[in-house]
Image (cartoon, rainbow, N blue to C red):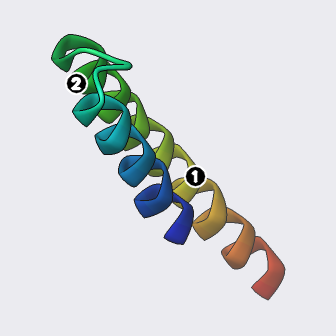
Amino acid sequence: MRFRYELETHLNIALMVNIIDTEKFKIFESTIDEVMKLLSGLINYMNKAALK
């Protein structure tokens, strides 16, 4: 999903210019992973439901 890469880019820039620290970056990164898994599962479910 494209927006993941856009969000990660913004977070990397925020880290580089010291808007966020490394600890916050890691928290955001793991949260992104969790949300992506949830969204992927929802999309797969919706696609399967649409085929029925």
| Horizontal and vertical percent position of residue 51 | 77, 87
**Type of amino acid at the residue the image marks with label 1:** Leu
Residue at 55%, 61% (x, y): give it: 3
Secondary structure type for disc 2: helix
Q: Mark 1 = which residue?
A: 39
Residue at 50%, 39% (x, y): give it: 35
Res. 19 image quadrant:
top left
| Horizontal and vertical percent position of residue 15 | 27, 30
Q: Mark 2 = which residue?
A: 26
Mark 2 packing: few (<14 Cα in 10 Å), some, or many (20+)? Answer: few
Reply above or below: 26 against 4.
above
Residue at 44%, 45% (x, y): give it: 10
How far apart in space, not on screen, are marks 2 and 1 (Cα)? 20 Å
Res. 45 image quadrant:
bottom right
| Horizontal and vertical percent position of residue 16 | 23, 35
Which of the labelled discs sits on residue 16, or is there none? none
Instruction: For the C terminus, give its image quadrant.
Output: bottom right
> Closest to the observer: 33 or 5?
5
